[in-house]
Image: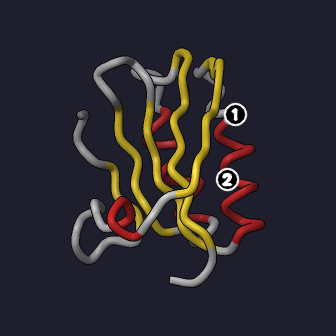
Amino acid sequence: MSGVIRHVTISGRVQGVGYRAWVDEQATSRGLEGWVRNRRDGSVEAVFAGPEAVVADMIAACGRGPFSARVDAVHAVSGNSDLLNLRRAGERFSVLPTV
């Protein structure tokens, strides 16, 4: 993997509206590596890895989300390979269980 890794938290009405499936589709179509999962606090957490401009575009898209979502905030920080490696073995991008 070359490029950047970003750890992102999205808050608002982002659970029960297809947000994780939308992130999976969007990240996969952009060729990104990483994962997405719901958090018990109602937010969605994701890790995106790839070329810096593509990751930045994905993070911006997370601020809009799917039609049925209402995004209140997107918080992105630098991530690392340990976070990236939480995805399922053999998958470029994974939808993980809630934590």
Identify the residue position indicated by label 2 in the image.
Answer: 58
Residue 10 higher or lower than 4, as above or below: above
43 vs 54: above or below: above
Q: Residue at x 63, y 32 (%)?
A: 74
- Tell me the number on the disc at residue 1: none
Q: Secondary structure at mark 1?
A: loop
Q: How many marks?
A: 2
Q: Secondary structure at mark 2?
A: helix
State the residue at coordinates (22%, 72%).
Answer: 89
Q: Which residue is mark 1?
A: 63
Are the residues flagged by discs 2 and 1 in contact, CB closer than 8 Å? Answer: no
Judge the density around disc 2: few (<14), some (14-19), many (≥20) Cα neighbours within 10 Å.
some
Q: Residue at x 41, y 47 (%)?
A: 36
Mark 2 or mark 1: whose residue is earlier in sequence:
2
Q: Nearer the viewer, residue 77 or 98?
A: 77
Asked if residue 59 is positioned above or below residue 75 in the image, the reply reads below
- State the residue at coordinates (22%, 41%): 97
